[in-house]
Amino acid sequence: MLDVAATQALRAADCKQRFGVYGLFYDLPLGGAVWPCRSILELIAHDLVPAGDPSPVLDRRPDLLVVMMNPGSSRSVEPGFTPPQVAGVAGIAAVRRLVETIPDTTQYQIMKVMAARGWRHARVLNLSDLRETKSPNLFRHVQSLAGLPGGDGHSIWSATRRDELLRRIGPAEGSPPVILGWGRHKALFPLAEQCLAALAGRPVFGVQAPEGPLAYAHPSPMMQAGKDAWLAAILGQMGAVG
């Protein structure tokens, strides 16, 4: 357990020394295109990862759940890794190959929260699984896909993926805490609404943004002062409830 100042002072190297990062990648045919996706990201203490194959981590109950916007540029550390192409939305849940993934500054923020609270495993989900690096493109894709039959299948919060979601987050009773940090853009609010409905009854934390009740500040804004403020706010919320 660390206090706020010690948590803010952790460096990327400190985080990587404590935790590994593993992703579940797939390619999704939808709307006449094939979309690169990532459904799950596991941030986990190195000694909890089975040697050889990290996939059993998917069956662990995490200490923390996190919901972000989308995977962005997330990718495997293996240059030659090719994600499996699923045969439609129904095939996503069958993907089981976890691969080591290159961490980013947002994930370091979550690792810092984990270090502060003494947690060893966080599971990150997203409003959209689409691996799109540019936010305006993501918003455009989400809105265009929404008009297609089954076009929300890129989101684990969609009704068609309900069983898969429950396997990843477990029952509401006794749920791990959930951090919300998907940002402020209104194009994602329909997915955010589905997400919050699915999380009903769980302990939820997040820095509310002024854009409305569906907007939650991103954990890693550009300036370091913003990153530190987010950490202080989240740890303050969690400390207030024990």
Image (spheres, rainbow, N blue to C red):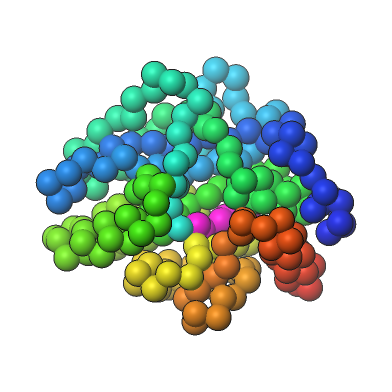
Residue nearest the viewer, comparing 175 with 211: 211
Residue located at (39% from left, 22% from top)? 81
Q: Is residue 62 visible?
A: no
User: Which quadrant is the C terminus positioned in?
Assistant: bottom right
Q: Taking 114 as reference, is 34 above or below it?
A: above
The span shown in magenta is 64-68
**Which residue is outermost to the front?**
223
Q: Taking 117 as reference, is 192 above or below it?
A: below
Measured as percent of width and height from the top left, residue 240 is found at: 78, 73
In the rendered structure, the answer to whether residue 84 lies left or right of residue 16 reads left
Q: How many numbered badges does the structure rendering display?
A: 0
Measured as percent of width and height from the top left, residue 176 is found at: 62, 58
Q: Is residue 74 visible?
A: yes
In the rendered structure, the answer to whether residue 241 lies left or right of residue 57 reads right
Q: Is residue 219 magenta?
A: no
Residue located at (44% from left, 41% from top)? 73
Q: Is residue 65 magenta?
A: yes
Magenta portion: prevailing SS class: strand
Q: Taking 197 as reference, is 231 above or below it?
A: above
Measured as percent of width and height from the top left, residue 95 is found at: 35, 35
Residue located at (67% from left, 58% from top)? 223
Residue nearest the viewer, comparing 167 with 49: 49
In the rendered structure, the answer to whether residue 21 lies left or right of residue 149 reads right
Residue located at (47% from left, 76% from top)? 214
Measured as percent of width and height from the top left, residue 183 is found at: 50, 65
